[in-house]
């Protein structure tokens, strides 16, 4: 499990991400990996979101202790 | 965003008063003065199911006037109380508009003039995903509109180990909360009572506290707004919008907002690295506007953070979590979205969709067509015979109108299958996974992964494929896909390829037919590439970001109602074009050209005319020279193309008729027709037969598939875009055919 620190994207994109729960402090867990770098994430425990490699690069996270 | 262009202030009055809509129907009249309730919620929270449970069949779906946004409206009959008009707005994650769907929601809730605002918002909250749903609720609170919460997915939440305290949630939000299970109708009666009470004593949601810094700034801007203008229930919303650098307002308020936003940014910076950044920006001489923008940007981010912080607080008071967070939905996803199984499973599902829209649909289509060509046509013939109607009238009714209506209705089963499949894939949650799996692939043509499905269906038939473009939420993407679909080679075109390839290419026939399919894919990708660079430069290539809703069993009733409505809308839009075209072609082929003769002994008359002597033949002859540079300047060929505009299925029959040859019962054994075609193409191409036939086949692939496609296109992307599409198809087809023929002549 990780904690989101920053979103590296322009304003519109950051707003889109925020709507789904990607704001600094949000918990992020990688639930699965698809082809070509795609990820299935759990955001704030309850929301499931798919991102591709480029989308994943926008999310700067900090590893949190497991538990 | 076209802000100011489409502000709700002008539109809203029309919107809420009268049921509107493009399909023209008005089956859900709500009496004037009835309370107006708007249904709002995130996507995939069971909002449509709730809407259906409230309104039953008293609803209809159509575009909002002047918009491409499809909205359902209906009447809610509450036992023992007055009817309520309900509008089901598209699912949205936020009230800050990024798409026309969200723009509409915002216009209705924020920008509507005081007298035109909805009386009540029923917000559907997904109990299994409260944090994100509360984010939207926090925004709703700022609009000051009275609200009732319908809590959905309580069962899903429970199965995930979440216990919810509904009373605590109602306390935290300051509005009534009613748990509902729309599928079974559980809680609907209570919702009716609560809504009735809320209508007589309306309360908005208690605003989400954003922390002292932000709240101070909001109060200051609100005060400036109130001082400058009349009382506005959405003052808090407007104040926040100004702080975030959006919306417009009185100059004084804008000035206060700018100053406060800058202060907030300065507090934040407080000498840390952001402060250093700012210092550097100052050194570089960044102008004031840039600094304002940075501040607004920062405020927006902080507001989003603060709303989530509030949502987490509410969640802490309301929800008790037990057990593991991993759900069975997650376990299914481990397979369906995995690197190894994702694509094969996706392809298997697409194969199933393709089979359902071809193999399963075909006998149903044939049965309907047969019914009209046989019994229905005969029935009309009998009636017309009894009243001794003139022969031309019988011809018009039987061969024109009845056969046109038959062709239209033969598409009904296919469309119904398509709509049901779409609903199943979408409602079950699989569509989002499929979009994830093929996203990279579809990016080639600048469309999201979901666009794959309509294209696959298009290989069967373009008509349901066009209906399938609705899975894309962005109307610009929908338009692009709608323009590309006709280049997907449908199965009706296959019959013509097989006939021509069999006659001209012998052993190589199979290869040639395969080549046409390859070319079709090249055309879709190529035209997608070109269109994106010419007319769709606005389509941003954003990285993928897609919510994966939990897997769910689709609701049969909702599916039934929606399929029926979409089908009805399709038939209504398509009927005009199809019946008109069939009748026109029938008329053209029945009217003799001046001076024509049916046989050497008798002059031709209406309905007794050989194809070559009819106006149809005349038109074909007039068109033919256009195809001289492509090597098939011949009226037989252009006649086939004219018929092909109506339906590709009819091309083989027309070609046979124009040569007065038997229609070959087996296209592989063309016989006399083959000989005649050979002679024609050899003559028109000056001996370069192969090049001319290839050019003809390519023209056939690329130009307008059939009039039903045109009708379906019109229903999905509008008349103007459809006409532009037809022009594009004809141009591309002609240019390609000429290029292929000319290159072929050089090479052979």
Image (cartoon, rainbow, N blue to C red):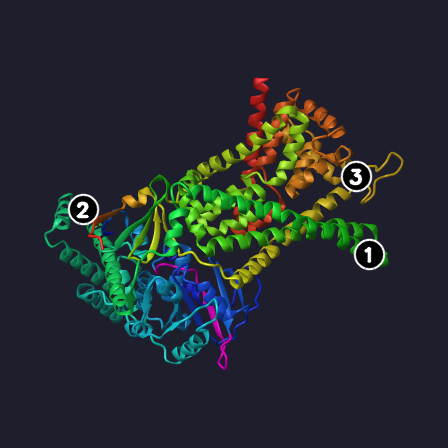
Mark closest to the chain's N terminus, 3 or 1: 1
Q: Which residue is mark 1?
A: B384
Which range is magenta? B77-95
In the image, what residue occupies the spot 45% across and 73% down?
Answer: B188
Asked whether, in this view, residue B661 is left or right of residue B195, the answer is: right
Q: Is disc 3 in contact with disc 1, using a CB cutoff of under 8 Å?
A: no
Pick the quarter of the image with the C terminus of chain B: top right
Seen in the picture, residue A54 relative to B695 is either above or below; the reply is below
- State which quadrant residue A34 falls in: top left
Q: Which residue is mark 2?
A: B286
Mark closest to the chain's N terminus, 3 or 2: 2
Please name which of the two marks, 3 or 2, marks the residue nearer to the observer: 2
In the image, what residue occupies the spot 64% across and 54% down?
Answer: B575
Depth check: give the residue in front, A46 or B218. A46
Q: State the count of labels.
A: 3
Question: At numbered mark 1, what does the secondary structure look like: helix, strand or loop?
Answer: helix
| Residue B15 appears in view | no
Q: Position of residue B374 (x, y in %)?
A: 76, 51
Taking the magenta stretch, the answer to whether it contains residue B86 is yes
Q: Residue furthest front?
A: B323
Residue B594 is labelled as 3
Q: Position of residue B4 (x, y in %)?
A: 37, 58
Q: Are marks 2 and 1 on the same chain?
A: yes
* Predominant SS along the magenta part: loop
Q: Position of residue B476 (x, y in %)?
A: 44, 48
Q: Chain of mark 3?
A: B
| Distance between mark 3 and mark 1 Cα atoms | 29 Å
């Amino acid at each position: 499990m990780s904690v989101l620190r920053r979103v590296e994207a322009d304003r519109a994109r950051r707003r889109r991400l925020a709507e789904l729960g990607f704001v600094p402090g949000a918990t992020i867990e990688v639930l699965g990996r698809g082809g070509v770098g795609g990820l299935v994430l759990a955001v704030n425990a309850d929301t499931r979101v798919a991102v591709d490699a480029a989308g994943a690069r926008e999310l700067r996270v900090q590893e949190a202790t497991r538990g | 965003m076209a802000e100011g262009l489409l502000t709700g202030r002008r539109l809203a009055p029309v919107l809420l008063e009268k049921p509107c809509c493009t399909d023209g129907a008005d089956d859900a009249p709500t009496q004037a003065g009835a309370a107006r309730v708007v249904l709002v919620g995130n996507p995939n929270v069971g909002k449509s199911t709730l809407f259906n449970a409230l309104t039953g069949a008293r609803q209809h779906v159509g575009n909002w006037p002047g918009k491409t946004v499809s909205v359902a409206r209906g009447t809610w009959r509450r036992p023992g109380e007055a009817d309520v008009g309900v509008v089901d707005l598209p699912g949205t994650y936020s009230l800050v508009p990024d798409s026309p769907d969200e723009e509409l929601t915002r216009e209705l809730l924020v920008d509507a003039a005081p007298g035109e605002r909805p009386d009540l918002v029923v917000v559907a909250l997904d109990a299994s995903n409260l944090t994100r749903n509360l984010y939207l609720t926090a925004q709703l609170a700022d609009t000051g509109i009275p609200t009732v919460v319908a809590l959905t997915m309580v069962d899903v939440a429970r199965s995930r180990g979440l216990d919810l305290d509904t009373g605590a949630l109602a306390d935290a939000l300051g509005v009534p909360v009613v748990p509902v299970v729309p599928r079974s109708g559980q809680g609907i009666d209570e919702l009716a009572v609560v809504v009735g009470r809320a209508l007589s004593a309306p309360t908005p949601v208690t605003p989400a506290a954003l922390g002292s810094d932000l709240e101070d700034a909001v109060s200051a801007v609100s005060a400036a707004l109130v001082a400058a203008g009349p009382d506005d229930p959405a003052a808090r919303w407007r104040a926040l919008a100004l702080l975030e650098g959006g919306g417009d307002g009185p100059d004084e308020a804008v000035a206060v907002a700018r100053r406060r936003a800058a202060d907030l940014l300065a507090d934040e910076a407080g000498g840390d690295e952001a402060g250093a950044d700012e210092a550097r920006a100052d050194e570089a001489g960044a102008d004031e506007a840039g600094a304002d923008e940075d501040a607004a940007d920062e405020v927006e981010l902080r507001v989003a953070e603060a709303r989530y912080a509030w949502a987490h607080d509410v969640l802490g008071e309301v929800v008790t979590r037990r057990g593991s967070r991993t759900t069975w939905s997650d376990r299914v996803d481990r397979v369906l979205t995995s690197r190894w199984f994702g694509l094969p499973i996706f392809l298997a599902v697409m194969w199933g969709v393709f089979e359902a829209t071809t193999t399963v649909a075909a006998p149903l289509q044939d049965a309907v067509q047969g019914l009209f060509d046989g019994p229905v046509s005969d029935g009309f013939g009998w009636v017309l015979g009894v009243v001794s109607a003139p022969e031309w009238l019988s011809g018009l009714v039987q061969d024109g109108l009845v056969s046109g209506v038959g062709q239209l209705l033969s598409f009904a089963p296919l469309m119904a299958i398509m709509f049901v499949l779409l609903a199943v894939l979408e409602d079950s949650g699989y569509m989002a996974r499929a979009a994830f799996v093929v996203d990279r692939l579809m990016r080639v043509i600048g469309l999201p992964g979901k666009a794959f499905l309509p294209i696959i269906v298009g290989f069967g038939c373009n008509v349901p494929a066009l209906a399938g473009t609705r899975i894309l939420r962005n109307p610009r993407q929908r338009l692009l896909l709608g323009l590309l679909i006709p280049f997907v080679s449908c199965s009706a075109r296959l019959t013509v390829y097989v006939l021509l390839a069999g006659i001209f290419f012998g052993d190589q026939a199979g290869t040639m037919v395969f080549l046409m399919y390859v070319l079709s894919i090249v055309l879709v990708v190529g035209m997608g590439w070109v269109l994106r660079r010419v007319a769709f430069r606005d389509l941003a290539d954003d990285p993928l970001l897609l919510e994966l809703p939990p897997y769910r069993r689709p609701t049969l009733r909702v599916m039934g109602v929606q399929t029926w409505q979409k089908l009805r809308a399709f038939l209504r839009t398509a009927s005009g074009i199809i019946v008109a075209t069939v009748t026109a072609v029938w008329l053209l082929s029945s009217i003799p050209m001046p001076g024509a003769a049916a046989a050497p002994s008798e002059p031709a008359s209406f309905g007794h005319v050989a194809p070559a002597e009819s106006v149809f033949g005349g038109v074909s002859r007039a068109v033919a020279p256009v195809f001289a540079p492509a090597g098939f300047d011949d009226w037989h060929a252009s006649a086939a193309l004219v018929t092909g505009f109506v339906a590709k299925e009819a091309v083989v029959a027309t070609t046979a008729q124009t040569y007065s040859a038997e229609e070959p019962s087996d296209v592989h054994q063309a016989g006399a027709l083959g000989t005649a075609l050979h002679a024609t193409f050899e003559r028109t191409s000056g001996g370069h037969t192969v090049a001319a036939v290839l050019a003809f086949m390519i023209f056939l692939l690329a130009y307008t598939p059939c009039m039903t496609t045109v009708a379906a296109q019109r229903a999905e992307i509008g008349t103007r875009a459809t006409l532009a599409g037809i022009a594009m198809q004809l141009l591309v087809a002609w240019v390609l055919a000429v290029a292929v023929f000319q290159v072929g002549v050089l090479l052979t």
